Image: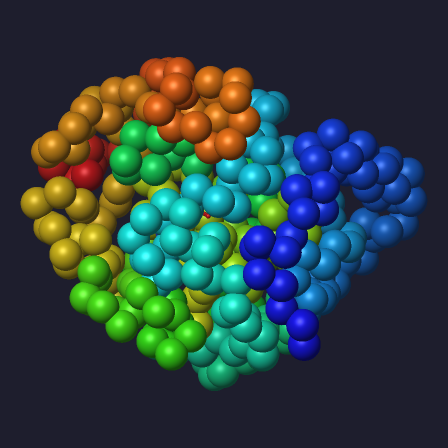
Amino acid sequence: MLIRKPADIKPSEITSKDAYFSRREILRTGVYAGGSLLAGPGLAATLPEARGAKLSGIVPSEFSTDEEPNPYIDITTYNNFWEFGTGKSDPFRNAQDFEPRPWSITVSGEAEVTGTFDLEDFVKPHTLEERIYRLRCVEAWSMVIPWVGIPLASIIKQFKPLSNAKYLRFETLHDPERMPGQRGRSLRWPYVEGLTMAEAMHPLTIFAVGLYGEVLPNQNGAPIRLIVPWKYGFKSIKSIVNIEFTERQPRGSWQRAQPQEYGFYANVNPNVDHPRWSQARERRIGSAGDGLQSIFGAKKQETLMFNGYGEQVAHLYEGLDLRKNY
Ligand code: MTE
């Protein structure tokens, strides 16, 4: 297979926002006008292997924000994915040769159904939804991203968790040959993250398999990653190969690396500062109006409690002291 390097990709080949959104309108009407398309158990998700391939059968979601999404170029060139380097442009540069297929996911632990599943079988029973979400990074920048994904709750139900399954623990692929950042010790590998069962089952939590209506680019966590929009971005673990239902609270990579700075919950909270910086405000990438992922000129805006998703998720944390449980 011919793999093109970023330098070979002309800017004109990168989906423009206008072209994308007019296509999305067609899709919207297509899905709704058809009516019957939505009947039955839903649309079976298929994931083409070719990079940049269009995804079909995407249904819009009531959970999307109306905010203007960042352009594709911001979302795919300003990334955190330490498996491909610690600089913001490293994942774009170093992940191009990564082959995310074939891919399998192992489900283990406290559930009736466990085993190793091919990605195609894993996603097939589900419907793809577009979820335009804010992403707030712990480093006090943010973006708006049109993900394509599957509600994690509908995936979890298939595995019939047992009553003692209190948490989910996720792991990224560990393969230093394919992920050059794993040859160094910037973090302990593999990258690990976890959620409570209630967080994982919340309707806002998704597994993303696409972006801007296309297969997920490598640098954004191909072929499948978690998205939890009310938490700092580091909870949204990329390129997942293991999912475990556990009784005990899992320890995430950042929590393990710097426990005094990163907690298990990591809910976006403007009232609890990071020990080294304020979390009260954030820079929206690209908001300086000069295109390419400008963080330096970007305007600052107030950070919202739970990243603006408080109405939907605050009840999950009733009775919990969010200053202690950060
Ligand atoms: N997942 C893995 N495996 N490795 C990482 O370094 N970085 C996290 C998260 N998931 C990371 C990861 C952080 S800090 C952020 S902000 C988001 O991915 C960034 O996602 P994006 O690059 O798609 O915007």
Q: Is residue 164 above or below residue 16?
A: below
Residue 148 visible from this viewpoint: no
Compare residues 134 and 204 and report the one nearer the observer. Answer: 134
Q: Classify residue 32 as left or right of residue 234.
A: right
**Residue 259 % position (x, y):** 11, 50
> Residue drawn at (29%, 53%), measured in percent from left and top?
86
Q: Position of residue 289 (x, y in %)?
A: 52, 18
Coloured how?
rainbow
The image shows a total of numbered marks equal to 0
Residue, x 34% and y 76% (percent of image)? 176
Res. 240 in view: yes
Where residue 221 appears, as percent x and y from the top left, is 48, 58
Q: Quadrant of the N terminus?
A: bottom right
Q: Position of residue 41 (x, y in %)?
A: 75, 59
Residue 130: quadrant of the picture: top right
Which residue is drawn at the image coordinates 74% and 37% (left, top)? 20
Quarter of the figure that contains the C terminus: top left
**312 left or right of 20 in image:** left
Question: Which of the 4 image quarters holds residue 190?
Answer: bottom left
What residue occupies the far front of the structure in this picture? 7
- Height in image: 277 above or below 9? above
* Figure check: 51 above or below 283: below
Using the image as rendered, state which of residue 236 and residue 216 is in the foreground: 216
* Farthest bottom residue in view: 115
Q: Quadrant of residue 55?
A: bottom right
